[in-house]
């Protein structure tokens, strides 16, 4: 019985040694996979943190820029509104002035038409005077011969 127990003990010890060797080999294989994976995970986590930190800083700067831009646009929009109101008033005045100019030009056109009629009348009268003077000058030339 003791020999059987010894044999069984040897068998159990052998099995345990094989199990330990197998476990040790398996652990070494896992170490070759897990440790580099762990290092890669740490590197990626640090890089991810850097990206998130940079993104949050950029978003903060963007929000400050948008706030500044909004204030500037608001201020410039008020100035633009005032300028457009002034321009509108100026355009209304220009429209009124052009309306008055149109009335004056119409009046001038009427006056020029009247002057054209008067000038034509004067031209006709001058023509008749010239004709009459020519008609009178013949008898006067004849009288000139008789008069000293």
Image (tube, rainbow, N blue to C red):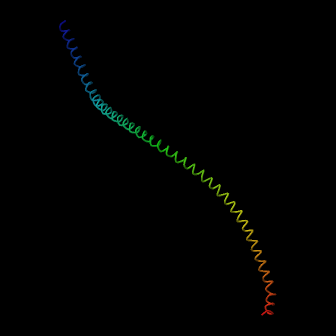
Question: Split into 4 quadrants, where in the image is the C terminus?
Answer: bottom right
Quarter location, residue 53: top left
Count of numbered tags: 0
Specify whether 82 is left or right of 23.
right
Query: Residue 24 location in percent, x, y?
Result: 24, 23
Reply above or below: 101 against 48.
below
- Nearer the observer, 6 or 145: 145
Query: Residue 143 location in percent, x, y?
Result: 81, 90
Specify whether 75 is left or right of 104.
left
- Nearer the observer, 127 or 27: 127
- Nearer the observer, 111 or 40: 111
Residue depicted at x 29% and y 28%: 34
Reply above or below: 89 against 113.
above
Q: Which residue is at the far top?
A: 1
Query: Residue 33 location in percent, x, y?
Result: 29, 29
Residue depicted at x 79% and y 86%: 137
Question: Split into 4 quadrants, where in the image is the N terminus?
Answer: top left
Reply above or below: 51 against 99.
above
Query: Residue 31 location in percent, x, y?
Result: 26, 27
Residue depicted at x 78% and y 82%: 133
Quarter location, residue 54: top left
């Amino acid at each position: 019985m003791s020999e059987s127990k010894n044999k069984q003990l040897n068998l159990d010890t052998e099995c345990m040694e094989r199990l330990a060797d197998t476990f040790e080999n398996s652990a070494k294989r896992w170490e070759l996979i897990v440790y580099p994976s762990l290092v890669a995970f740490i590197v990626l986590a640090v890089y991810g943190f850097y990206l998130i930190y940079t993104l949050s800083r950029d978003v903060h700067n963007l929000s400050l820029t948008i706030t500044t831009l909004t204030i500037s646009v608001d201020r410039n929009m008020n100035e633009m509104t005032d300028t457009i109101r002034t321009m509108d008033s100026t355009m209304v005045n220009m429209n009124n002035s052009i309306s008055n100019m149109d009335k004056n030009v119409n009046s001038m056109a009427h006056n020029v038409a009247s002057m054209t009629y008067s000038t034509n009348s004067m031209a006709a009268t001058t023509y008749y005077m010239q004709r009459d003077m020519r008609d009178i000058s013949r008898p006067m030339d004849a009288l000139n011969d008789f008069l000293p």
